[in-house]
Amino acid sequence: MKKFLFGAFIALATLVTSCGSKDNDTPTPPEKSPEIIKDNDTPTPPQKSPEIIGVWQMESSTIDGKPMAVSECTIKETVVFTEKTIELLSFKKRNGNCTYEKQELLAYTLSGNTFTTKNGTTNFTITEGKLVIEGAYIDVDGNKKPSTTTYKRITEKELAALRAMEYKAP
């Protein structure tokens, strides 16, 4: 199961890359002619943030269409999407407690229902408040099987409780 989760995360991370530039010069905005709205036209609504931005906690996982049993720690896996980065909180049991180790943030770009990191590209869908990430699981024999992990959106308060479970080395 750890290989599956690691593989799913790698697939997720592979989809995200960063691009951009830093200019010290402030560009002059281009002149824009006023938009004329005809009586039958509907104005274009302002763009909203992508639905993927937020905090998502694992709800279930399947490999080759079969539900996978996940441990009490694994089910706490959480993915935090900001406008530019992804953070993964992947839990495991240490000294009888579920904890996670802080990891580096991954930069990503978003294009439709695909996000890309330096590790590759991942497909996802969001339906009825659920984030579904599709990937591939490679078993111990090297066979590649389709996998799906479903996440539910959680609150900042729930995230704060999970962050309190960060592993602090003695």
Image (cartoon, grey):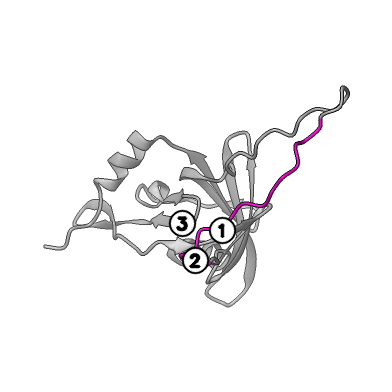
Rendered residue at 75%/37% (across/down): 34
Q: Which residue type does callout 1 highlight?
A: Pro
The answer to which of marks 1 and 3 sits earlier in the sequence is 1
Q: Residues within 10 Å of mark 3 (few under 14, many from 20)?
A: many
Which residues lie in the magenta part?
21-36
* Proximity of marks 2 and 1: CB atoms separated by less than 8 Å: yes
Rendered residue at 35%/50% (across/down): 73
Q: Position of residue 140 (x, y in %)?
A: 52, 74
Q: Quadrant of the C terminus?
A: bottom left
Q: Which residue type does callout 2 highlight?
A: Asp
Q: Residues within 10 Å of mark 1 (few under 14, many from 20)?
A: few
Decide if residue 106 is on the left or right side of residue 101: right
71 in the magenta segment: no
What number is the disc on residue 103?
none
User: Which residue is nearer to you in this view: 36 or 41?
Assistant: 36
Task: Provide the secondary structure element on which disc 1 rests.
Answer: loop
What number is the disc on residue 86?
3
Residue picked out by circle 1: 27
Mark 2 and mark 1: span between their CA atoms?
9 Å
What number is the disc on residue 23?
2
Q: Position of residue 20 (x, y in %)?
A: 54, 65
Q: Residues within 10 Å of mark 2 (few under 14, many from 20)?
A: few
Q: Which residue type does callout 3 highlight?
A: Ile
Q: Position of residue 49 (x, y in %)?
A: 57, 42
Q: Is residue 64 above or below residue 138?
A: above
Mark 1 and mark 3: span between their CA atoms?
29 Å
The answer to which of marks 2 and 3 sits earlier in the sequence is 2
Q: Marks 2 and 3: which is nearer the front?
A: 2
